[in-house]
Image (tube, rainbow, N blue to C red):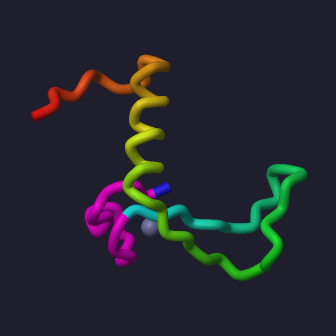
Amino acid sequence: MHFLPDSSSLGCRIEGPHVHVRRRSNSSAYAKSRQSRWIPVEAETVALYADYRYERNETPEVASC
Ligand SMILES: [Zn+2]
């Protein structure tokens, strides 16, 4: 998952928040396609994921403006 507006520092050229879908053999759940792809993620979903991580104490509190 690349939820930053710009993931170029991670070596990814796709703009905006997105999720990479790749077939892996380490799980019984397979992606339908053999080809890797990516799916755009809406800002609201990114915010909900940040709330989830905060509620699980996985990230420090971020001051709001
Ligand atoms: Zn990416």
Q: Residue at x 16, y 31 (%)?
A: 64
Viewer-proximal residue among 56 and 30: 56
Q: Main secondary structure of the magenta part?
A: loop
Q: Position of residue 9 (x, y in %)?
A: 26, 63
Q: Name the residue located 38 percent from the left edge and 55 percent from the top edge.
A: 43
Q: From the image, which quarter does the C terminus lie in? A: top left
* Residue 44 counted in the magenta span: no
Query: Would residue 53 be found to the left or right of residue 34 on screen?
Result: left
Q: Position of residue 7 (x, y in %)?
A: 32, 64
Depth check: 30 or 49 in front? 49
Q: To which quarter of the image does residue 48 belong?
A: top left
For the magenta stretch, what is the residue range? 2-16
Q: At x 16% / y 27%, what residue is drawn?
A: 63
- Image quadrant of ligand 1 equals bottom left
Q: Is residue 5 above or below residue 61?
A: below
Q: Residue 27: x percent and y percent?
A: 83, 50
- In the rendered image, the vertical position of residue 65 relative to residue 43, given as above or below: above
Between 42 and 60, the residue placed more toward the observer is 42
